Image (cartoon, helix red, strand yellow):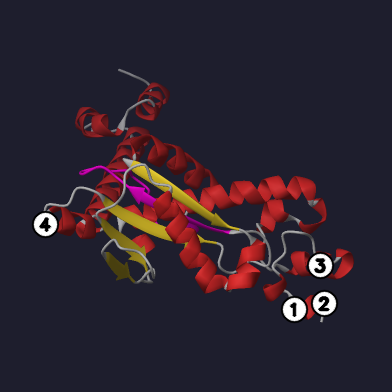
Amino acid sequence: MLSITEIKRELNNTALEGLEDFCSRYGSDSRSGVQKLVSSARRLINKHQKELERLESITLYEKKYRSMGLEYIGGIDEVGRGPYAGPVVASCVILPSGCVIEGINDSKKLSEKKRDELFDIIKEKAVSIGIGIVDNNKIDRLNILQATYKAMRIALQNMPVKPQQLLVDAVTIPDVDIPQEAIIKGDAKSISIGAASIIAKVTRDRMMREYAKKYPQYGFEKNVGYGTREHEEAIVKYGLCDIHRRSFTHKFYE
């Protein structure tokens, strides 16, 4: 008979698809420690099943358009409309039909580590990805809404494979000749938009960490340009730097 330590080691080395077999083999073991391990395995199975159900629910928009004969459904989202500093970044992602990537969700709901993991998986599996970046100077000239639209159009221009249908988080992009559907809170309702939000978020955060090396006094590696108390105190102390949005920071120099 295996010891509880050995069974625990076996559980830790068991892939998701092997958990049902693990529960079958040890379910009748009367030792309380083993039963705790079996309960842990069942919780993992239930968690996995719930995630598959969630993923099924967030592919409904993609399935709707594929049922119409369309192959390339692009989800598009942006990150960085609110910060005091840095660019606004948009991304458009086309995932292949039937693609399931566990964990995809609104990027704001994910940890930095999880976003980085999903970023690499999405880059590997996507049919096509486009990224659009509009810097702080253009944001000041255009206003943030128009700059966001511009970043989205640039993302579309940068796609190796163009979408036949767009799913957009909350807005309709002007001056785009691809059919669009705006979805409120789309980054949590569409797997394609969720993937785009992760690509845009990780791209922008990495840019801001690079800017932090040039402008270390503002804490961009932590706040990624958003208006935290520490960031505002740094602006008061050091003034604005080259990547600050003047249209967002009037109160600091007027």
Image quarter of residue 228: bottom right
Quick one: 42 or 33, which is closer to the camera? Answer: 42
Q: Could you tell which of marks 3 and 1 lies nearer the N-terminus?
A: 3
Q: Could you tell which of marks 1 and 4 lies nearer the N-terminus?
A: 4
Which label is found at residue 68? 4
Q: Give the foreground label among 2 and 3.
A: 2
Name the residue carrying label 2: 253
Question: How far across and down, in percent of the image, does residue 136 sit?
Answer: 65, 63
Figure check: 233 above or below 37? below
Image point (80%, 65%), residue name: 240
Name the residue carrying label 3: 235
Q: Could you tell which of marks 4 and 2 lies nearer the N-terminus?
A: 4
Instruction: Report if residue 237 is visible in the image.
Output: yes
Q: SS class of the residue under badge 4?
A: loop
Look at the image and give the residue range highlighted in magenta: 88-109
Quarter of the image containing the C terminus? bottom right
Which label is found at residue 250? 1
Image quarter of residue 249: bottom right
The CA span between labels 4 and 2 is: 54 Å
